[in-house]
Structure formats: structure tokens, C-alpha cells
Image (cartoon, rainbow, N blue to C red):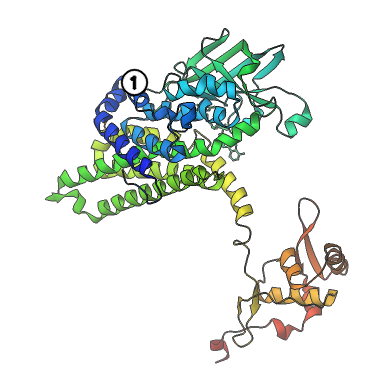
Amino acid sequence: METYPWWSEKHNKLADEAKKFADENIPRGEEILWTREFPSDLLKKAAERGWFGASIPEEQGGTDMGATGCCIISEELSRVCFALAGAYITTIIGGTEQLLRFGNDEQRKRWLPRIAKGELLGAICISEPVVGSDAAGIETTAKREGDEYVINGKKKFIINTGVADIYCLYAKTSNRPQDITKHNHLSAFITEKDTPGFTVERINELSGWFGLPNGYLDFNEVRVPVKNRIGAEGEGWKILVNGLNFERNLFAAGMLGPMREATRYAVGHAQRRIQFGQPIIEFQVNQFKIADMIARLRTARLLVYHAAHLLDMGEKAVLEASTAKLFTSEAYRELVSDAVQVMGGDGWTRFYPVESFLRDAKVNEMAAGTSEVMRTVIYRLGLRTMAEELRMPHRRVHEKLKVPISTAKSPTTEISEKKILQMLAEDYRVNPDLYMSRKDIEERLAGISDEQLDKLLTSLEAKGLAFLYKGKRGNIALAKATYKGLRQAKPLEYYKWFPEWIRE
Ligand SMILES: Cc1cc2nc3c(=O)[nH]c(=O)nc-3n(C[C@H](O)[C@H](O)[C@H](O)COP(=O)(O)OP(=O)(O)OC[C@H]3O[C@@H](n4cnc5c(N)ncnc54)[C@H](O)[C@@H]3O)c2cc1C
């Protein structure tokens, strides 16, 4: 496994050990693609190496390898088979993570050392038959009765269904509209297997991820002790969203293994398949596909391990983890599609594992948050955090060249309707189709207050000299001179512009 310069010695050593483990166990992983067995034997081997404790501090029985360590393990386990990586990742983000961040001392002592030893597998129960992307709409209820909560409802698509020992479950503990509005209506619980009333309703027949049980759970009057609630009542949403970045990153790490394997198969196949008298790798079209595969793999790995590093530094890494998940899931699908194409018909037979990656890849654009949800997060947060660098440059007509070019800001101290109208007229020359932003106007009118600017712009609008666009809160956000405004601000000559060659 290729290491990164910022990894610690501990991580480098782990990477070697995990790669060796994967190399040795890939044959067993391939068996599972045929038998569809749950990989208990492989999980046991991973547990013996202490890998279930990778995110857990040493004093709680773990190895304290952080997000980077968990990603290294997930990447190599996913080379063996996704059932192994999926069961591992789900345990790390289904109970372990929530207990580490929000559990009390008693809960941590009760569960973490056993998770670290690999004695307990976890599951994360958010989705329901009626709840997918809109996770806040959870309908499963938890009603407090004395020292217990009574849970009723259903969960769907749950990884590790039936094989998990602890299920990290989110349920509704309040129906009050004010709690729902503030997202204080959910709570998180650990529900242990074999709790009366808690049953597996069905196992999904999935298109991929063979060997990893996924199903529906039914909760019928399930009594869970209050001491199993993680965090305070009503903190469920906070706990849920807090774990999402790590979850997204870890799932992305679990795609890197098959991406590496698919690339390996495509290259090996192309080097050894002779057509038209030469290995098909000699055809540039195949070389380009392989180059794209390598580029996708290397970019995805960088995104994953960069986000993991930020998480280890205590940052939330929302943008980075969401970007890693979005990019890697799409890159994985494209990479495997190319790998199959390079391998020709062989790639689509079940006699090579690449076919299984083709089926597995698609679901990553849905599970652990869909690509549309990732894009929504990236768009919203990206625009907020990158607001300064995404601001459109201020542009003016160059004195000599007479063409619009960017310019440093030059505030004016004259604050008047006339000045604003001239500013809008100048903006028309450089951005004829666009409105001028309130911020741009404010910055150019040194010291103007919000009230002053509102008054002047509203007055211009009332006189038919400016169009105003109001934002959702009714605030003036954008302004533009009307045709009448343009005429009043400057003579027609001011707006005219012709290329030199027209004059000639
Ligand atoms: C194999 C597998 C394993 C899973 N494992 C687990 C698990 O262990 N635990 C768990 O709790 N859940 C699990 N899930 C559920 C997973 O998180 C959901 O599938 C996912 O959140 C999407 O929900 P949905 O499938 O109901 O799609 P929907 O939410 O119904 O969405 C359908 C489509 O509409 C789009 N869409 C929805 N809302 C919007 C919006 N506001 N804007 C734009 N587009 C939108 C979606 O992006 C998608 O393309 C798993 C799912 C799968 C398939």
C-alpha cells in the first residue's frame, strides 16, 4: 500500500500489516463471492490483530489509530471482499463512534473494550421504510416508561442485520413541533440483540455486497434500559450528524480496495491478451483507460486520506469527507466500468472478481448518503466556507484599453443617489447582463450604513431608475440600473464600444 508523508510510523506499520493480511486472504474473499457466507472467520482474524479497536483510545482497550488507521484497515479489508470491509466499517460507525463521542463512562467501559477485542459487531439503524435521505423524518418511536424506553417501529437496509450484537438506533422521543423544528426530537440508543420484541423482518436480496447481510428490523414494544441511551434525550440528531463525516470517509476508504484490484486485473489482462498480433495494452485506447483508472484511484486515495488526517486533527472535515465520498463512489463506478471494458467479455464473467466490483460500485452512490445529498452538502457548505474566494472580482473599464478588466477596489467617500446610479451604469459597461451585488456597492461606498443604502436604492427604484432584487428575508441583495437609469447616469457615448478592426 502506498503510504503518505504525513502518516506516523504506526500508520506505516499498520499499512504493511494490513496489506499482507489482504494479500493472504484474497482467495478466501473470492470464495465468499460464490458462497455468499458471512466472513466470520476473516473478522475473527481482523479482531486478533486489534483492528476493531483502531478508533478506540488505548485506555479503553483500543489501539488509537484514529481515522487514518481505520481507513487503512478498511481499504485493505475491501481488497479481500466488501462483506469483510462492510461488517468492519459498520461496527466502527455503528455504536463505537457514538459511544466514543457521546457515551458516558459506564457505557464506554461496558462496551468499548469488547468492541475493541472484536467480540461485538455493531450496526447503524437510521433508515426506515418511510425514511431515506430525509433522516430527520424518523418514525420509529421511543417512549419513556420509568427506567426504560419502549421502542416501536421498523428500520430498513441495515448492514450487519442479524449478525450484529449492538444496534445503534435512532428513534423519535418527542412529537412537539418546536423540538422537531430544532431537531431535538430524536434520541440515540444501543439496542442489544436478543432483546424481546426486536426481530429481523427480512433479508434484502441485494445486487452486490455478497456475504454482507442487509435487512429490515422490526421493533415491537422493545424495552431498552435508559442506561442504553447515548447522550441526553433529544440529542439524537446531533449524535447522528456528528458521525456522518467519519462514516462517509470510511465508506470511501472501503471503495479503494476494489479500485486497486480492478486496476490490477485490467492491466494484467491487457498485458497478456493478444489481439491483432499484439498485447491489447499496446492499443492507445486501452492505455488511456488505464491512465484514467490510475488517475481516479490516486485522486480518490488522496481525498480519503486528507479528510482522515483532518478528522484526526480534530476538524469536522464536512466538506472534505463529503467530497471524498462523492468523488470516490463515482470514480469507483467509472473505474470498474473501464476495467471491464479493457478486459472485454472476460471482465463481465463471474470468473474474474472485477464483475463483482461492477455490481458493488453502484450502491456506493446511494448507501451512506446519496451522491445528490453529498452534492447538496458540498454546495451549501462550499459556498459558505469559500465565500471570500468565490466572490466575483470587481471589474472596471480600463482607462487606456477601454475594455472591462478586474481591478482592485477603490472606495469612494461620496455617498449619494447620483453616485450609486453612476456605479450601476459603470457596472452595466462591464457586466451588461448582471445585477450588482449589495456587498460590491457597500464596499465601494466607504462607511455607508445598511439603512442609508436601503433608502438610496429604494428611492432609485421608486423613480424607475433601478431594478432591485430582494432575497428570501426581504433584504435588498442585488441592484441594476433600468434603461432609464442608464440614460440618466451617462450619455449614450459612455456605453459605446467597438473593436478596432470595425473602425478600420
Ligand atoms: C446496500 C445498502 C446498505 C445500507 N446500509 C444502511 C445501514 O446500515 N443503516 C442505515 O440506516 N441505512 C442504510 N442504508 C440506507 C441508505 O442510507 C439510504 O438508501 C440512503 O440514505 C438513501 O435513501 P433511499 O434509498 O430511501 O432513497 P431516497 O431518499 O428515497 O432517494 C431517492 C432518490 O431521490 C434523491 N433525493 C432524495 N431527497 C433529495 C433531495 N432533497 N434533493 C435531491 N435529491 C434527493 C436521492 O438522492 C435518490 O437519488 C443502506 C442502503 C443500501 C442500499
Kindly identify the residue that appears in the image at 47 percent across and 33 percent down.
Answer: 55
Q: Residue furthest front?
A: 59
Q: Residue furthest bottom?
A: 504
Q: Is 309 displayed left or right of 125 in the figure?
A: left
Kindly identify the residue that appears in the image at 84 percent across and 66 percent down.
Answer: 461
Placement of 397 over or under 25, stated as above or below: below
Task: Say which of 400 and 51 sits in front.
Answer: 51
**Residue that mark 1 sits on:** 36
Label 1: which secondary element = loop
Q: Quadrant of the N terminus?
A: top left
Decide if residue 276 is in sight here.
no
Task: Say which of 52 and 286 sits in front.
Answer: 52
In the figure, residue 435 lies in which quadrant? bottom right
Q: Residue furthest left?
A: 277
Crowd tier of the residue under label 1, counting other residues whose Cα lies within 10 Å: few below 14, some 14–19, many 20 or above: some
Placement of 356 over or under 161, stated as above or below: below
Placement of 484 over or under 311, stated as above or below: below
Give the image location of residue 57, x and y in percent.
48, 32
Task: Say which of 286 and 423 sits in front.
Answer: 423
Give the image location of residue 230, x and y in percent.
62, 24
